[in-house]
Amino acid sequence: MGETPHRSADAGTGGTRVTQSHEWPAGASARVAEAPVSTRSPGGAGLGGGGALPRSRKFGAERAFRGLTLAAGTAVLVIIAAIAIFLVAKAVPALRANTENFWSYEGWSPNDPEPKFGIGTLAFGTVLSSALALLIAVPVALGIALYLSHYAPRRLGTALGFLVDLLAAVPSVVFGLWGRDVFSSPVRDFSIWLNQHFGWIPLFGGDGPFGASIMLGALVLAIMVLPIITSLSREVFLQTPTANEEAALALGATRWEMLRTAVLPYGRPGIIAAVMLGLGRALGETIALALTLGITFGISFNLIQNGGNTIAANIANAFGEANETGRGALIASGLVLFTITLIVNITARAIIYRRREFTESAA
Amino acid sequence: MAKRVEASNVTAYYGSFKAIENINLTVEPKTVTALIGPSGCGKSTFLRSINRMHEVLPGARVEGNLTIDDQDIYDRDVDVTAVRRMIGMVFQRPNPFPTMSIFENVVAGLKLNGVRKKSILEDAAEKALRSANLWDEVKDRLGKPGAGLSGGQQQRLCIARTIAVEPQVVLMDEPCSALDPISTLAIEDLMFQLKDKFTIIIVTHNMQQAARVSDRTAFFSIEKTGDPGRLIEYDNTQKIFSNPSVKKTEDYITGRFG
């Protein structure tokens, strides 16, 4: 304790070359950069400096960086505005030419002389397949993440985590082809079995054919979003403060109880964010669903019959042979998809925001 | 509500590193026992082996005998969670659950034990918070986050959380080292009251604190870095601080070493 004031007194004087500091031109940034390194190190005039305070720089790295970040931030707004304007400008003429109700008509023939198209079935298919995919993927992903972060031996955890991340790197068209050519036959068999035994539930009813169904699409989607949700929630779980885990254990919690008391609540905002990112990917997924779904236009909760369609898959399938109105109609559907993802994101933010009092004080 | 803790030949390892060796020590019920000694001498390791928190770390293990009222807590058939319920622990840094309110924090241990009834939980929370001298300060904001309290209040909240499950023994690992003098005083006062009900073992670096709060004091030390910590002297606090029988203890207490 006794030596502290002594030491700080030394530092305050800034060494012996106090007078030299006066010779530094105020505000000349170029000269500062040219100055030999030794003058900026404690061996020279001393960082604390004696003499007059130099004026703040008019221009320097600080300002340049500020400008750079401002430009980057503005670019986001400009890009979003440009996309929105593009979507609206292209969509409006097609929507005016539509001879049926855009919201409720079940079908998509915008290329006809009398264009008829409706978003209802597509939006329904999009939301249903994504919701189903999340329903399957989230519990599995959280289970994997908890295992990797808290149960697996460290080395195994790292290795498996790497594998999961690899799964995220597989292109979606590969998933789509695999789903259509390989995964569809076990799903078809399973669908037939479901239909025989649980056909009385409307979800599994129908007379076939089965296979290229919402269920296949949702399963493939689930596998695709699994790695995102897993690796994000694993990161979040690993960040739980050891102090909180020990607090739970010291109260006599078993490991699962410790996870429930300390780890899961702490990771909640992170889990929500991970799920929303997964949902974002599922909603926007194009090619995998275009390859696996049976492409029909109709609103049905039947999960196992051939059929189903989503906004993104429809754009991929129909864009090639679309005329002017057809393209406008597809862009209008893109606008609806954009709105759906926006609503999803705002909801997620709201959920996280509502609990901020508890999560912010955690930091 | 309070039990005797007996350690015989307790040796603890972190992997291949031996942190403490052959600790023999008996703590009587309803007393406060202070563990003092230089950093790295194994006092915290010993404390953590009393409620089997030591083995939570990968590669850590304990040998020897530790009994609570003649019950071997390292017995193969003993449920480790039951041991930790019987022997509560307060940590160096206040660690309330950040996602929980003050009320939820206090009853967290009870909920883990399957207590669900709201009236029971409320009564227990009030009782524990009163025992921790925190009730008057928080009774109007039980639903607020526990992490929003001051450091000293958070530590008393953690004490309330620990004693809410009515353990037999309370272990405290430098409970005041992150607190200012006023909060420290509040916690020391609290220890005086709590020893009517619990056996308290406290690790502290603050020798005045050890002298103020404890009935008995155990001095731990190491020969040199890398050696296992050993119990050098264990006696009544008054004796340790006025007339220790080992030279090393005297050197440490008078500040000549450590």
Image (cartoon, rainbow, N blue to C red):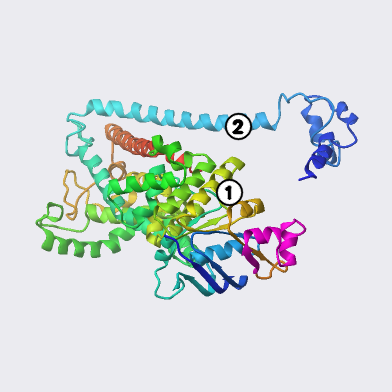
Q: Nearer the viewer, residue B41 or B14?
A: B41
Please state if B26 lies on the left or on the right of A123 as rendered: right
Image quadrant holding the C terminus of chain B, namely bottom right
Query: Horizontal and vertical percent for residue A275?
Result: 37, 47
Magenta highlight on residue A141: no
Q: Residue at coordinates 66% horizontally, 28% vertically from top-left? A: A63
Q: Note whether residue A233 is visible.
A: no
Q: Residue at x 46, y 56 (%)?
A: A245
Measure the C-alpha gap from mark 1 to mark 2: 47 Å
Report which residue position mark 2 lands on: A68
Examine the image and state in which quarter residue B102 appears: top left
Is residue B254 shown above or below A78?
below
Q: Tell me the mark number nearer the camera, choosing from 1 and 2.
A: 1
Q: Which residue is mark 1?
A: B176
Residue A193 in sight here: yes
Residue B157 in the image, given as x and y percentages of width and height:
46, 46
Name the residue type under label 1: Cys
Chain letter of mark 2 equals A
Q: Nearer the viewer, residue B216 or A192?
A: B216
- In this view, the residue in front, A222 or A262, is A262
Q: Which mark is residue B225?
A: none
> How many discs mark residues in the rendered view?
2
Q: Nearer the viewer, residue A12 or A84?
A: A12
State which chain disc 1 sits on. B
- Pick the quarter of the image with the N terminus of chain B: bottom left
- Label 1, secondary structure: give it: loop
Question: Disc 2 marks which amino acid?
Answer: Leu
* Residue extent of the magenta highlight: B229-258
